[in-house]
Image: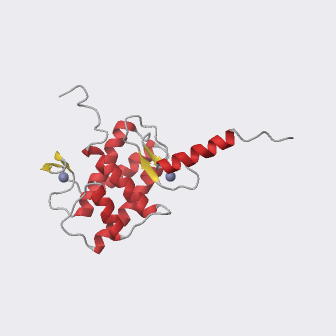
Amino acid sequence: MGAGAGAMRITGYRSHGVAAAVALVNAVTSAGGDASQEALQRLLRENEFFWREFEARDAEEFRRWGATLRPFFEAASIEDAMRLLNELMLEVPMHPHLAVHEPHGLHMHYAPPSSRLPHRFRATTLMNLAELVVEHGLSRTGVCAADGCDRVYADTSRAGRRRFCSETCANRTNVAAFRARHRPEPEF
Ligand SMILES: [Zn+2]
Ligand SMILES: [Zn+2]
């Protein structure tokens, strides 16, 4: 084991549930979100969740879970976030075990082995968010700081200074702040 072995794998498998949770919450709860079954399947694939069959009722379960996770990103205090995650960890049946498959190699599964996709997704996103909180408190997650944007973000970069859901929102806000600073002084 190398020097950094105990550190969080910033962009590795452990954070894929975090990115997936963000994508789902934004698809389901944000103003411009697309919660269609096709969009949900696309975001699952992009975040490395795979399935044998996907039914209409699965899409409905994902929509419910996205709405359930939103308050985590809005939590004003670590106590609120802990309470929410702890309640959900009691509700979502867990059966942690080791698994080996592509593209993740050896890794943890949190749901019981025969679980369907929506349940696997709930268990993994929940545990990955809990791990993020253990490592970083609430400093890595939140609602976008840009005016008029209600999308959530999670920052799994090394620097961890992100406050926006996207480059677009960061740039828009920086330009507005620059203009405000350089506005000519009023004449009187
Ligand atoms: Zn797996
Ligand atoms: Zn934004």
- Outermost residue on the bottom side: it is 56
Q: Quadrant of residue 55?
A: bottom left
Q: Is residue 177 visible?
A: yes
User: Does residue 180 appear to the left or right of 38 in the view shown?
Assistant: right
Q: Quadrant of residue 113?
A: bottom left
Q: How far across and how far down the image is residue 95, in percent?
A: 18, 53
User: Does residue 144 appear to the left or right of 4 in the view shown?
Assistant: right
**Closer to the camera, 14 or 42?**
42
**Closer to the camera, 124 or 52?**
52
User: Does residue 38 appear to the left or right of 111 in the view shown?
Assistant: right
- Outermost residue on the right side: it is 188
Q: Is residue 144 visible?
A: no
Q: How far across and how far down the image is residue 78, in percent?
A: 44, 42
x 34%, y 37%: residue: 135
Q: Quadrant of the C terminus?
A: top right
Q: How far across and how far down the image is residue 56, in percent?
A: 29, 74
x 25%, y 57%: residue: 49
- Outermost residue on the top side: it is 3
Q: Quadrant of the N terminus?
A: top left
Q: How far across and how far down the image is residue 107, in percent?
A: 18, 46
Number of numbered discs overlaid on the protein picture: 0
**Closer to the camera, 73 or 50?**
50
**Closer to the camera, 89 or 103?**
103
x 39%, y 67%: residue: 35
Q: Is residue 54 above or below residue 156?
A: below
Colour setting: secondary structure
x 33%, y 60%: residue: 43
Q: Quadrant of residue 118?
A: bottom left
